[in-house]
Structure formats: structure tokens, C-alpha cells
Amino acid sequence: MVNVRLRPVVSKINLPTVIKSAILPGDSTERLFIATQVGEIFYIGNGGVRTFLDIRPRIIKLGASGGYDERGLLGLAFHPHFYYYGQFYLHYSVTGSQGPGALSDDFMPNPCDPQTLNLKWTNRETKYDHIDTVEEWILQANGQPQKRRTLLNLRRPFMNHNGVNSLNFSPETGKLVLTTGDGGSGYDPFNLSQDNMEIVGKIIEIDVAKDTFIANPPVVSRFNELPVPIQETLTVIAKGVRNIPGIAFQRLNHEYIKYVGNVGQDLEEAIFSFIQYKPIPVTQLVQASFINSMTNLKGLINFGWRGWEGDFPTSFMRPCSENSPLDEKIIAYYNEAITTSTQRIHPLATYFHRDSRPDKFSGTALTGVQAYMGNGIPGLTGSVVFTDFAWKESQPQVKGILAYTRVRQVGKLNDFSVIKTEYDFGSQSAFYVSLGTNLDQTRLYLGVYGSSKVTDFNQGTIFEIVP
């Protein structure tokens, strides 16, 4: 077991959704940037916390139904040439865009009722939850950030599964990578993640070098609804996504390993890795849909959702009887599990929502995956570190958990190990909400929040993970 300490860097901030590093134009020091779910972006500079940007008026009202929310400021990425040109990118949920949602009731699939297995998202212009936007901003010469253009306006069916840490630049292609989720609810009611025309449930590359100016891009949910100039900036890396806390890159010789985590439904959380992939231009996807041909799209990475949850067929559980501690596990989408069984890639590592083994833990939701290339914590060098929101056995004060795995052994599902953290949170809960690193991936940062509600303010702390 690896032992680490948590060293507080900054405290009393709102929900820290993104932790990134960048060098400001004209500066010589790498700064740590923190984006909060409510719309603030701070950086650590000259011994204090400074505000980089505050877009709270642009963010949808959060926490209206009980305090828990998965919308807000979800993505921040700095252009690889940010130091020279000042470009950065935001993904957030737009103020005033609240809708009634795509379904009036909670959804649960029933294998005995085909109607629940073949639902369609209809009346999308009125039956949606909110609108997300992806924007390009620029830091002006006077040091003030200004919005430059909108890249995408996306209609979302439900409140949840919008992704987090959802914007990252690929060191391999130089493109902006957008990682979101399947649109929300549970069990992907409309099977959007496997539909090649649906924008949700995918990993998308955006070629920001194609300087496409469309004053007000339309609000869409499908690729074929996008204007052709925007289609031409997009390629799709992967589908079968449930919800993703970002994408991480690890250089290995002359290649990059890509790591993503797919948040689970009822059974397990999964970390995937891949090196080779064939990004499919959206224009090609749209053309293939017109002629109903998908034979030339075999290079697309498929994580298997909604047919597969990690390495298991997607199931739902119900108690066997009032007195039994056992649950009956029922495959939710048998036909889809069969159909996608040979198309999907297998996880690098998984962990369960229930695990009684003494050296493991019962998790809740994956919140970060990050390659670590430093030598400061020798036991973690070259490993893949991940965080879970809340370790179920940590009652009454809820606490998140850190763990790690390593580069894949051929043909095997990797094991994982818990990272023991020495820090006393006292009587306050500590939900682990984000994971970040510096530019060369030699330092690790952890975002912790004292509540699961966005309406509880100033309970966040950023820690550096140190030996």
C-alpha cells in the first residue's frame, strides 16, 4: 500500500470541478488554476488566490431540487499555445435554459416491457432539461478575459451526466477533446450513447485551428443538426459513454496511452485505456447515416454502455426477499449486451459498489483519472491514479478515496490498490470531487468538498498529494 499526505493548498472555495496548470502570458511561473461548479476560476499566484474569471451570471441556477446538481461550469482547458495567444476554452450550463426534462417520471428498464426498452426522445425543442455551451475565450493584452466565439450549443435531456473536467487538449493531435455523458437520468433511457448521430455519450475532438465563426450556432442534440462548417471541425473518438471525468494522456515511448473513466450505474466503476484509435469525421458519420451504412466506422472505440457497465452486462438489482441480504441481479438490456459484446473494448481496471475484501473499498462514483509521471511518490511513478466521490464504508462522516492501477498487462483485467491518505478531516465529510496535475504530470492535486450539495458554499479545499 502506498502512503501519502494531503497538504492543503487553498481552502474555503466552492465546488472545485477542474484543477489545471498553465503559464500566463508574460509570466514565467506555472500557476495552478481551479474552476468551481458555480462559475468561478481562480489561480494561485504570488502567495495568494486570485480571480481569473467569474462567469456566475452565465451559469444556470444550481441546486433548485434539493441541492444536488451535475450542471454548472464543467470544463476548462488552456490552449497548448496559451502562453503566446491567450486562448482558453469553457464548457458550462447556460443560465435561463432550464426546461422540464425529457421524461416526467423516473426511468427504470423492464426486460418484460418492450416499451421501456425502446423509448425515443421526442419533442426535443420543449422536452429537455438545459443547454450546455462550449466556448473559446481569449486573455486580452490588458489581462481581461473575453469570449471570442461559441463552438457548440448542446441540448441536454436531463440534469445529470454532463461530464466533469470535460475539456482537455490532446498532446497527440493538438485538438480539444470534449468528454461528456449519455444525457442523464439512469440506464440511458433513449440509448443515446450507442446512436452514432447523438452527440451525447461520445468523446469528441474539436479542431479549434479551423477558425469557424458562426455568430449564434444552433442549439442541437444530433450531429446532423449542426451546420456543415461546424461538422467539419469535429471527429468522434469513442461512443458507449455513460459519464466521464475527463481524459488523461500518458506518454509511452513514441505513443500516448489514453485513460478515461466511465462512471457506473449499480455495479462497478471502470477505467479504460487505449492507444490506437481511428477518429471518425462527423461529416462521414452524417453521410453514413443517410445511406444507412456503418460498415466503415469500425475504428470507433466503444465502451459498451448501455449494454455493458464496465465488464458486466448492465443489470439492475432488487431484494430477493424482505429477510434476505441478497439481491437478484437482472440483465436490463440482454439483446444490447449481446450485440455490443464483441464491439466494445474491455476495461483496464474496475472496482465495485459493494466489496467486502479488506484491502478494497465500496465506491460510489469515479471523479478523476490521472497518470502520474513524477518520482516524488515512488510507489506511484508511472501509475494511473483515480478518485472516488464517496467511500461507502466511511460513515458517519463520508470520505472519498484514492487508489491506483498500472499500465495494462496483456489480456488481463488489472487489479488496483488503495492509497492510504494521512489527513484528519475531523467531523466534516470529505467528498473527493476532482483530481488534477501540473503540466509535466509530476504533481497531483485533489479537490475535496464538505458536502454533496452545490447550495452549501465555501466548503472546498485543494490539496497537493505529497509523500
Image: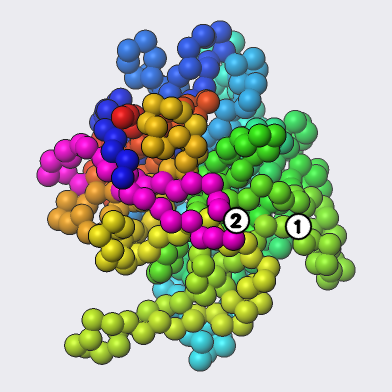
Q: Amino acid at mark 1?
A: Gly
Mark pair 1, 2: CA separation: 20 Å
Whole-percent x, y for residue 126 in the image: 57, 63
Q: Residue at x 56, y 8 (%)?
A: 26
Counting residues from the N terminus, which is met first, the one under dot 1 or under dot 2?
Answer: 1
Q: Residue at x 59, y 77 (%)?
A: 337
Are dots 1 and 2 in contact, CB under 8 Å?
no
Q: Magenta residues: mostly which secondary structure?
A: loop
Q: Residue furthest left?
A: 427
Q: Amino acid at mark 2?
A: Val
Q: Residue at x 17, y 40 (%)?
A: 425
Q: Is residue 138 magenta?
A: no
Mark 2, other Cα within 10 Å: few <14 / some 14–19 / many ≥20: few
Highlighted range, magenta: 401-429
Q: Residue furthest right?
A: 291
- Disc on res. 410: 2
In the depicted structure, whether residue 39 falls above or below residue 238: above
Q: Give the foreground label among 1 and 2.
A: 2
- Disc on res. 299: 1
**Image quadrant for the N terminus?**
top left
Whole-percent x, y for residue 172 in the image: 69, 35
Mark 1, other Cα within 10 Å: few <14 / some 14–19 / many ≥20: few
Whole-percent x, y for residue 171 in the image: 65, 33
Q: Considering the numbered disc 1 on the image, is that residue within a helix, a strand or a loop?
A: loop
**Image quadrant for the C terminus?**
top left
Residue 219 can be seen, yes or no: no
